Amino acid sequence: MATKAGEKMKFEDLGVEIIVTKGGDGDVSASAGGDGLKVGKRYECEATGIQVLVTKPGAATLQCNGQPMALQEPKKTKSAD
């Protein structure tokens, strides 16, 4: 199943909402548990390249094709001296 950029996903049973920022060929799902999702955090599936942004937090974890999605670290910028 293809996931398209701009697609909004709601997981009503968990109270979580995300938006796809980079699409790809994969299926994104959520399950209860884990450390929880925080607003503004981005997650990525390394295998498919799918990236999502959390728009409504909750006690859940994200998976892509059954595998956990990795939290994206903020991009480091060069400091101005």
Image: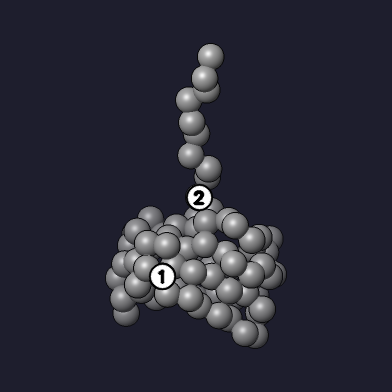
**Where does label 2 land, which residue?**
72
Q: Position of residue 45 (x, y in %)?
A: 41, 60
Q: CA distance from mark 1 to mark 2?
A: 18 Å
Mark 2 residue element? loop
Which mark, by number, is residue 6? 1
Which residue shows up at 48% across the image and 76% down it? 8
Tell me where residue 28 sits by quadrant. bottom left
Kind of residue indicated by mark 1: Gly
When the figure is inspected, residue 26 is found, relative to residue 44, above or below; the finding is: below
Q: Are marks 1 and 2 in contact (CB under 8 Å)?
A: no
Q: Is residue 1 left or right of residue 54?
A: left
Mark 1 residue element? loop
In the picture as drawn, the residue positioned furthest to the top comes out as 81
Which residue shows up at 50% across the image and 50% down it? 72
Kind of residue indicated by mark 2: Gln
Mark closer to the observer (1, 2)? 1
Tell me where residue 57 sits by quadrant. bottom right
Q: Is residue 36 left or right of residue 21?
A: right
* 43 and 75: which is toward the camera: 75
* 39 and 72: which is toward the camera: 39
Residue 66 appears in the rendering: no
Which residue shows up at 62% across the image and 85% down it? 12
Query: Which of the two discs, 1 and 2, labels the residue nearer the N terminus?
Result: 1
Q: Position of residue 30 (x, y in %)?
A: 55, 75
When the figure is inspected, residue 27 is found, relative to residue 52, above or below; the finding is: below
Q: Position of residue 25 (x, y in %)?
A: 30, 70
In the picture as drawn, the residue positioned furthest to the front comes out as 80
Label total for image: 2
Tell me how the rendering is colored: one colour
Q: Is residue 15 left or right of residue 65?
A: right
Which residue shows up at 37% across the image and 62% down it? 22
